[in-house]
Image (cartoon, rainbow, N blue to C red):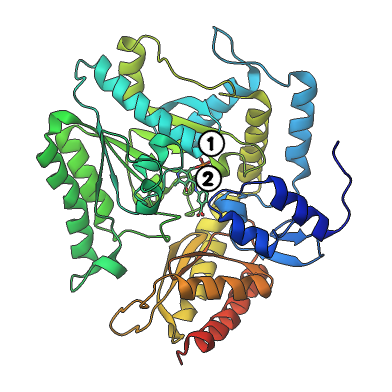
Amino acid sequence: MIQKLNTTEEWQRQDSAHHLHPFTDTNEINALGARIITRAEGVYIWDSEGNRLLDGMAGLWCVNVGYGRRELADAAFRQMQELPYYNTFFKTSTMPATELAAVLAGVTPDGFNHAFFANSGSEANDTVVRMVRHYWNAMGKPDKSVIISRNNAYHGTTMAGASLGGMSYMHAQGGLPIPGIEHIEQPYWYHLGGDLSPEEFGLKAAQALETKIKELGPDKVAAFIGEPVQGAGGVIVPPATYWPEIQRICDEYNILLVADEVICGFGRTGSWFGSDTFGIKPDLMSMAKGLSSGYQPISAVMVHDRVADGLIEKGGAFEHGFTYSGHPVAAAVALANIEILKREKIIETVGADTGPYFQQRLRELVDHPLVGEVRGVGMVAAIEMVKDKKTRTLFDKVGDTGTICRDHCMNNGLIMRATQDSMLASPPLIISTKEIDELVDTFRGCLDATAKDVGIS
Ligand code: PXG
């Protein structure tokens, strides 16, 4: 029997007794007790103790239109009454899935006219792996099967998603990566650039792809995948020289270019897609998160005509899909979400107004003794804390300072994420300039408190 619980402690006890959390040490969370989040509105969330927190991470980089959108709840309610579920497998379709595919063809760059639906970013990237291999097979090149990704990339946690990702601590669990996935250097100038200028380093990091392709043989390589801006890896914005060189190499060696738009998509960087912001011309794009602003689990792989034409003409059936591919309720919510993004000109505002303001205000923090670099674009940013900013020297035990700072943020009503010693921010796109001021001002106070704790002045 499910008990009715009243106090935070009771909820925490139940959570500890039965719930295994993602990326969480169960003993640790059980000792502390989980913070129980109860409601949300705009850019704020509340916990069961009544504390209000400014959600500087938009959930997990996903609540682009902000919390409390009645319109999205209404879309789900209507669709659930009309048709709560039907699949898209056996020569059937549903209206929301059909319409969403068409709307996505409209908002994605030219030449993207086909969508394959799944339920999460990980599933979208698994779909990418299977689809690019199926494509080259259909093109009579079955040996073109290796997918090249990057160290410190994040592409999800399924077997293929975690393998594509370049997180060594994830690979260490469960014998990853799976065969046929290779990794190259990431374009992280601040850590890896040494004496090179960012532009020189951007070229060098991109040319690691060419070296890897030559080492493997171009006839063996199916695709390269990258996030336009690495998100979970630390909001790593590549130097301006990076993506054009990656594009040149993919074109020259006939390698498909896959943009993982799971974080960058739907306005995060100030354009509809990170590919628009960085001038990337991908062959496939995976997307999730902002597609529904997190109100429903849904993801998609958008396929450019260059690939779709061959797949449709020569591929036959693609033996792949999920029970909930194109789920009508999720699709209806995604449609309503895209409608809000368009009607309220949210992406234009981030691109021209609030995004530049956010970046400018955060860049004021570079005068702080702890801050080595502030980087970002649109409504996503990182503030990297270092031991010695003149020499770009990291702390001896990387990660501790990030944790201290994150806890100060939490205790002061601000949610930020720490990756190593970089503090990440990715607030809802509807954040106002006044709320941006609150975020930055609160954060500066947390930086001061952190500096004191780690003995930097
Ligand atoms: N690609 C990218 C670029 C992502 O950021 C995924 C794929 C996987 O999506 P799903 O929906 O399967 O989680 C992601 C997800 C973090 C964090 O701590 C980031 C993500 C997920 C969970 C935590 O920053 N990104």
Rendering coords of residue 208 (x, y %) = 17, 51
Numbered badge on residue 239: none
The quarter of the rendered structure image containing the N terminus is: top right
The reply to whether the residue tagged 2 has its Cβ within 8 angstroms of ligand 1 is no
Query: For this view, does 43 lie left or right of residue 323?
Result: right
Residue position for label 1: 120
Residue position for label 2: 266
How many neighbours does mark 2 have within 10 angstroms: few (below 14), some (14-19), or many (20 or more)? Answer: many
Q: CA distance from mark 2 to mark 1?
A: 15 Å
The reply to whether the residue tagged 1 has its Cβ within 8 angstroms of ligand 1 is yes
Observer-side mark, 2 or 1, equals 1
Disc 2 marks a residue whose amino acid type is: Phe
Disc 1 marks a residue whose amino acid type is: Ser
Task: Answer yes or no: is residue 290 visible.
Answer: yes
Label whose residue precedes the other's in the sequence (2 or 1): 1
Asked if the residue at tag 1 contacts the one at tag 2, i.e. Cβ–Cβ closer than 8 Å, the answer is no
Rendering coords of residue 419 (x, y %) = 46, 63
Query: Going 52% across and 26% down the picture, which residue do you hit?
Result: 117
